[in-house]
Amino acid sequence: METTSQTPQITVYRQPSEKDWTLSKFSINGIFMGVGVEDEFRKDKVHGETRIPNGIYEIELVPSPKFSKYFFMDKDGFLNNTQTARFDKPHLLIHVKNVPNFEGILWHWGNTDDDTDGCYVVGSNFATFGVQKGVSASKIKYIEVYPIIFKLYQENFKIGKKTFVEYKDAAQ
C-alpha cells in the first residue's frame, strides 16, 4: 500500500540566482550533506537553461545513457568506476519526477551551470571557475551521497512510501 505523504527527505536550500546560475546547499533527513549548482531562475522556462521550480517532487532511480556507463553499483548503492563481481550493475541515477514542463532532471556531477542542462549538480564546496560560480569535488560528493539516497529510496520503496526532494529558496 502506497502512502500519499509528500514529506521531503531531501531539501535543497537555494541562494538567490546570479547571472546564469543558482547555488544551494542540500540536506538529507535534516543533515547538511553538500552544495549544488543549477541554472538560474527564469519566469518563462528555457530548455536546459532554467532551474527547477520551487516545490516538492518525487524522486526515482533510473538508468542514464550518458552517466550510467561511468560507474557500476553494488546491492547497497556503493559506486565503483570498474565493473567487478561486487559492482556488477550500471548505476541508476537520481531522477526528479513530475516537474511541470521539465523532463529528464537528474542529480549528477559537474562544476558549473554549463554542466547542468537543467539538472542538479552536487559538490563539496562552492568554487569559482573563471567568471562562473559553481561547485568543486563534485564526483567525490556524488559518490559519497549516492549510497545514502539509494538506501533511503530502497527503504521507502520496501514499505510502499515514496521519496521526495524539496527545492526552496533559503529565505523560505
Image: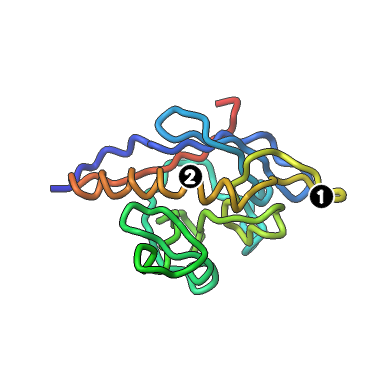
Secondary structure, mark 1, is strand
Residue plotted at (67% across, 38% down): 125
Q: Residue furthest right?
A: 130
**How many neighbours does mark 2 have within 10 angstroms: few (below 14), some (14-19), or many (20 or more)?**
some
Q: Residue furthest front?
A: 85
Q: Residue furthest left?
A: 1
* Residue 121 in picture, x, y percent from top left: 60, 51
The scheme the figure's colours follow is: rainbow
Q: Tell me, for residue 145, which label it has, or none.
A: 2
Quarter in which the C terminus is drawn: top right
**In which image quadrant can residue 92 be found?**
bottom left
**Vertically, is 128 above or below 92?**
above
Residue plotted at (50% across, 45% down): 144
* Residue 5 in picture, x, y percent from top left: 27, 38
**Vertically, is 167 above or below 129?**
above
* Residue 25 in picture, x, y percent from top left: 59, 35
| Image depth: mark 1 or mark 2 in front | 2
Between 21 and 146, the one nearer to me in the picture: 146
- Residue of label 1: 129
Residue 30 in the figure: left or right of residue 137: left
Rounded to the nearest angstrom, the CA distance separating label 1 from label 2 is 23 Å
